[in-house]
Image: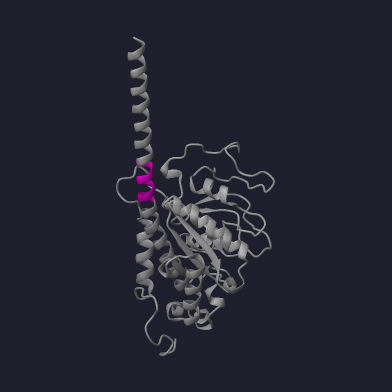
Amino acid sequence: MSADAKCGEPWRKTPKWNTKLLDDLEKETKGYTPSEGFAFTKARILMVGQVGSGKSSFINTINSIFKGHITSQACSGNAQESLTTEYRMYQIRSGKNGQPMNFRLHDTRGIEAGQGVDEIEMCYLLDGNVPNRHQFNPSVPLSPNTPGFIKNPLLSEKIHCAVFVIDGTTIDVMVENITEKMNKFKKCMNQRGIPQIVLLTKIDKICQKTETDLSNVFYSTPIKEAVDKISQIMGLPRSHIIPVKNLESEMDLNTNVSILALLSLQKMLHFADDGMNNQKGEDYYDVLSNITIFIMLAFVCLLGLWFYE
C-alpha cells in the first residue's frame, strides 16, 4: 500500500486493522452473552433489506469467518425477485462441530415494491410470532391463524436488534415505495424499542481505493457521502450506518473483510442488549398493568358479594 493511500484523518476512527484486531473481535463475539438480569442467553437480530442488497450474503460472510472457510448456507445471489422465500433463523457455530454462539441471525424475504413483507407481517416478525422456517405465500397473508403462529412469545423469542441492508450502489435510484416501506418498518421498531442499524453493502463498487484495499473504507470520501445520504433517507444517526463488503468473489477468507464484518456484528450485539433492556421494561409494565386490572376486578367482585349479602 502506498504511503499516501491513507492521507488525512479517517472520518470514523477504529482500532488499527491487523490480525490482533481480528482475533480480539472473534474472541469478543464468541464470548458474547446478553446483559445480566435476563433468563435467556441469545440475542436475536433481524436482517431486512431490498432484493439483492446482500442480507443473506452477510449471514454467509459471518458464518464463513467462524467456520474458517467460505460457506453458502443462506441462499444468496442476484435475482429480480427475492431468493429468500422463508423466514429462517441461523445459528453461527465456531468451527465444524462447535457450539452455537449466543446470537441468532434471522433472514426474511426481501423488500419489494409490490410484494414482499408488509407492515403487519413485520410487526409479527418483530414480536416473535413467526415460527422458524415459515414459508411466505403472497396469496395467503400471515395472521394469527397461520399454522405454527406463536401467540404469546417470550422476550427471548422477540427481535432485539433490526438491521436494514442497503446496496450502496443503488442509493441514488432507490424506489420511493421501498424507502416508504422501510420507514414504516422503522416506525414499528421504534414503537417496540428495537434499535436499528443500516449495513451499507457493496462499498467496493463505489470507491476504487476501497476496492483495492478495504482498509481505506473510513478514509474514503465517496463512502462517507453515501453514509451521509443513507442517514438522511433513513432518519438514523450516521454512527448507525456501517459500510461492509460481503464475501462474494473470494475463494478464501480475507482479513479486512472479516474485520469490517465483525465490527458491524459487534455493533449489532451492543444494540441488541439495548433492545432487550427496552423490551424488558415494556414487559414489566404490561405485567404490572395486568396485575392492576386483576386486583380491580377482584375488588369489584368482592363489592358485588358484599352488596349481595
The percent position of residue 172, horizontal first and vertical second, equals 59, 74
**Is residue 280 shown in magenta?**
yes
Front residue of this view, candidates 66 and 79 = 79
Residue in front for this viewpoint, 306 or 31: 306
Q: Main secondary structure of the magenta part?
A: helix
**249 drawn magenta:** no
Q: Classify 141 as above or below 165.
A: above
| Residue 253, visible in the rendered structure | no
Q: Quadrant of the N terminus?
A: bottom left
Image check: 71 left or right of 261? right
- Rendered image quadrant of residue 266: bottom left
> Is any atom of residue 159 visible in this view?
yes
Magenta residues?
276-284
Quarter placement of the C terminus: top left
Residue positioned most to the front: 307
Closer to the camera, 179 or 51? 179
In x, y percent, where is residue 126?
49, 49
Seen in the picture, residue 116 relative to 15 is either above or below; the reply is above
Q: How many marks?
A: 0
Whether residue 56 is situated above or below residue 129 in the rendered picture: below
Image location of residue 28, percent across then percent down: 35, 60
Q: Which percent across, then down, holds residue 186?
A: 50, 57
| Colour convention | one colour
Q: Residue at x 33, y 18 (%)?
A: 303
- Considering every residue shown, the one lying at the far left of the view is 36
What residue is shown at x 59% (from left), y 40% (from top)? Answer: 143
Residue located farthest toward the top when viewing the structure as drawn:
309
| Residue 237, quarter of picture | bottom left
